[in-house]
């Protein structure tokens, strides 16, 4: 028997703490957000709301007094004292009406201003949160993404933003103040039982609506991942990159089916929750509210019929009951936005916590300056091991690799060998899980990541094609220095793209996207040259290390050969790391390293590696054979070295 008691007690405690977590704490978060809208606007809005909340009550009182004064005024005639009182009360009612009309737009304007300020402060916070981690691991963590999409969704909408919720909550204060005053009016005219019954009816209506929304909104969280899929499937049909494949592969039917399935997976839980949350509780609470409201109105009528209240008191009481009952509805401007905002703010808090947790798993980022001229001897991967977050598979397994300062080192290896991962570690996008990357013997984790990254110009395989002008696309290689157009042109020339850019309608100022007036798009190879120019721009701005990950994959073979001839010339004296599948490209590098199974398996110059007749020599011969058979290139284009090997 006794065992049931603690269980019941702990059940109540759990429900209570759940309610506090779901309904109280998020509201406090909204309140704490208000000062970011500016203290002045918040105070002004609070005052305006209270005044606007009370004006309808004043209007009801004035019109009721007006009704009560009519018999005496009619009996006294024009000019009588009662007539003057009637006119005065009428003018008062008119003034109240006019004031309401005047203050409402002012209230809206101040609310809009506050809303924008709160939302922009929060948007900045979400962006700063996601930019805070030194590496990119958190951006690939599913829990982080869920919280982020839920938090950010609130700003993507026109309604239901946290800023709107702040405004809505101040609006609620006004409504509840009005309810309180109306209850007092009802109590002092038709009696306190009726007043309390009306208050209970209003709260029952409100709970039916608002409490239902709170429970219903739990579904939003359950389906957030699925909703991302819906948004993705919708978005992918809109991008011109996917437009080609969708048509060529005939994917539209498949995509439509997949979209419908994902959408149904989101919609069905909503439908089920709607029936469960709204139907029965809503009907019960509404019936209770109607009973209480009806009872108090009948009570007021009985009082009037038996002559126990005056005409004025009856008019006032009945109007107050009607006005109070109208407060028992659903306030979209306050209820929907507070609910959405509560979820968004809770998600933002969880995002902050999650990023904190992930940060805690990493050593704190270093703060040291990077000495001038680093690296003066070498960059080195010192027994570096690495596996991606959430995976146990070692992508790098004790890599020892030295990039001598001022020389070009090439890394080759099959797909998935871990070449790009090396670049990510060099750029501190991830930290090694064992070992260290060192510059002149110093672990680069000790350097301030921002300062370290300024030392390296990196072009990734999947470099970004910014929808900006050509000049901006190049100058983004060093955003910390003012744009120097002479340098932009110089590096564009070196990358072999200057003539093509100058021939565009707006020259270097042409937007590189057809989505903008006067904009244009470039070919894959031309974009790759822009990316190379971006890296060269970083070098001009003080970077000392150049990393090119598959820099020429989109160039034709002739262009590639020309590029590498020039590349070696252009980067003489620069510490560079070159990653490529094409062995014909890397043969010009000072050192070549073969990566396989997460380790360095061969190293040396091209000639040394060919002479060693190992893995490099075999893969090189295989590619050379393809060239010679004309699979990749015309016979005339076969690079000299390739022919040599093929002989
Ligand atoms: N963000 C990631 N999360 C988990 N695993 C990853 C991630 N990025 C890459 N990998 C895995 O790590 C391995 C090495 O990838 P990496 O991109 O470094 O190879 P790569 O040698 O550059 O390949 P490619 O020549 O195809 O570009 C692959 O097996 C890949 O699936």
Image (cartoon, helix red, strand yellow):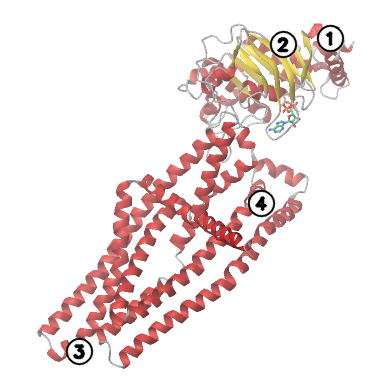
* Residue 561 visible in the current orientation: no
Circle 3 packing at 10 Å, graded few (<14), some (14-19), many (20+), is some
Residue 583 placement (x, y as % from top left) = 78, 17
Which residue is tagged 1? 610
Which residue is tagged 4? 226
Circle 2 packing at 10 Å, graded few (<14), some (14-19), many (20+), is many
- Ligand 1 rendered quadrant: top right
Sequence-first tag of 3 and 2:
3
* Residue 531 visible in the current orientation: yes
In contact (CB < 8 Å): disc 3 and disc 1 = no
Kindly report the distance in space between the C-alpha atoms of the residues bearing marks 3 and 4.
67 Å
- The correct choice, above or below, for 416 with respect to 121 in the image is above
Sequence-first tag of 3 and 4:
3
Kindly report the distance in space between the C-alpha atoms of the residues bearing marks 3 and 1.
115 Å
Which residue is tagged 2? 589
Which residue is tagged 3? 71
Mark 3 vs mark 1: give the one in front: 3
The quadrant in which the N terminus is found is: bottom right
As helix, strand or loop, the secondary structure at mark 4 comes to: helix
Kindly report the distance in space between the C-alpha atoms of the residues bearing marks 3 and 2.
106 Å
In the displayed structure image, the side of residue 362 where residue 594 appears, left or right: right
In the displayed structure image, the side of residue 256 where residue 97 appears, left or right: left
Kindly report the distance in space between the C-alpha atoms of the residues bearing marks 4 and 1.
52 Å
Mark 3 vs mark 2: give the one in front: 3
In the displayed structure image, the side of residue 180 where residue 6 appears, left or right: right
As helix, strand or loop, the secondary structure at mark 2 comes to: loop
Sequence-first tag of 4 and 1:
4
- The correct choice, above or below, for 595 with respect to 12 in the image is above
């Amino acid at each position: 028997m006794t065992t049931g008691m603690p269980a019941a007690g702990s059940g109540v405690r759990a429900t209570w703490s759940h309610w506090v977590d779901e309904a109280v704490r998020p509201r406090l978060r909204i309140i704490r957000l208000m000062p970011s809208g500016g203290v002045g606007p918040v105070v002004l809005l609070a005052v305006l709301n209270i005044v606007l909340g009370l004006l309808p009550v004043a209007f009801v009182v004035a019109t009721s007094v007006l009704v009560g004064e009519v018999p005496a005024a009619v009996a006294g005639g024009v000019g009588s004292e009662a007539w003057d009182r009637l006119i005065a009360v009428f003018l008062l009612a008119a003034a109240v009406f006019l004031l309401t009309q005047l203050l409402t737009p002012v209230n809206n304007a101040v609310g809009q201003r506050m809303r924008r300020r709160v939302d922009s402060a929060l948007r900045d916070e979400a962006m700063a949160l996601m930019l805070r981690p030194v590496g990119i691991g958190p951006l690939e963590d599913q829990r982080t993404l869920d919280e982020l999409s839920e938090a950010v969704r609130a700003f993507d909408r026109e309604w239901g933003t946290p800023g709107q919720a702040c405004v809505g909550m101040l609006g609620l204060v006004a409504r509840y103040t009005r309810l309180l005053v109306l209850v007092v009016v009802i109590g002092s005219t038709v009696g306190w039982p009726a007043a309390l019954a009306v208050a209970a009816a209003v709260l029952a209506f409100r709970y039916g609506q608002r409490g239902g929304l709170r429970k219903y909104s739990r579904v939003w969280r359950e389906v957030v991942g699925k909703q991302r899929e819906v948004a993705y499937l919708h978005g992918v049909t809109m991008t011109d990159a996917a437009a080609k494949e969708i048509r060529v592969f005939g994917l539209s039917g498949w995509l439509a089916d997949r979209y419908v399935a994902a959408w149904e997976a989101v919609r069905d839980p909503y439908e089920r929750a709607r029936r469960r949350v709204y139907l029965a509780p809503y009907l019960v609470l509404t019936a209770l509210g109607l009973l209480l409201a009806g009872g108090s109105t009948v009570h007021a009528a009985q009082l009037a019929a038996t002559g126990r209240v005056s005409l004025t008191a009856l008019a006032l009481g009945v109007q107050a009951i009607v006005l109070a009952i109208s407060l028992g509805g659903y306030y979209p401007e306050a209820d929907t936005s507070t609910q959405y905002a509560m979820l968004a703010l809770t998600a933002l808090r969880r995002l902050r916590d999650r990023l904190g947790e992930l940060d805690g798993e990493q050593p704190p980022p270093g703060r040291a300056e990077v000495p001038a001229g680093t690296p003066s001897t070498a960059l080195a991967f010192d027994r570096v091991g690495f596996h991606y977050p959430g995976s146990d598979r070692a992508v790098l397994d004790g890599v020892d690799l030295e990039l001598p300062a001022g020389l070009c080192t090439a890394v080759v290896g099959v797909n998935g060998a871990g070449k790009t991962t090396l670049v990510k570690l060099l750029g501190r996008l991830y930290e090694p899980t064992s070992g260290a990357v060192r510059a002149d013997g110093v672990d680069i984790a000790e350097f301030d990541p921002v300062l370290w990254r300024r030392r390296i110009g990196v072009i990734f395989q999947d470099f970004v094609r910014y929808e900006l002008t050509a000049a901006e696309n190049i100058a983004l290689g060093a955003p910390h220095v003012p744009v120097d157009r002479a340098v932009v042109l110089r590096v564009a020339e070196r990358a072999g793209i200057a003539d093509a850019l100058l021939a565009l309608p707006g020259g270097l100022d042409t937007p590189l996207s057809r989505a903008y007036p006067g904009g244009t798009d470039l070919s894959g190879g031309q974009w790759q040259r822009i990316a190379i120019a971006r890296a060269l721009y970083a070098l001009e701005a003080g970077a000392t290390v150049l990393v090119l990950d598959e820099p020429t994959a989109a160039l034709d073979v002739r262009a590639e050969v020309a590029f590498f001839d020039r590349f070696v010339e252009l980067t003489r004296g620069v510490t560079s790391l070159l990653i490529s599948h094409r062995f014909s490209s890397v043969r010009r590098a000072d050192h070549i390293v073969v990566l396989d199974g997460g380790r360095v398996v061969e190293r040396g110059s091209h000639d040394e590696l060919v002479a060693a007749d190992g893995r490099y020599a075999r893969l090189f011969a295989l590619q050379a054979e393809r060239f010679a058979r004309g699979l990749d290139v015309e016979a005339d284009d076969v690079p000299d070295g390739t022919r040599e090997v093929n002989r």
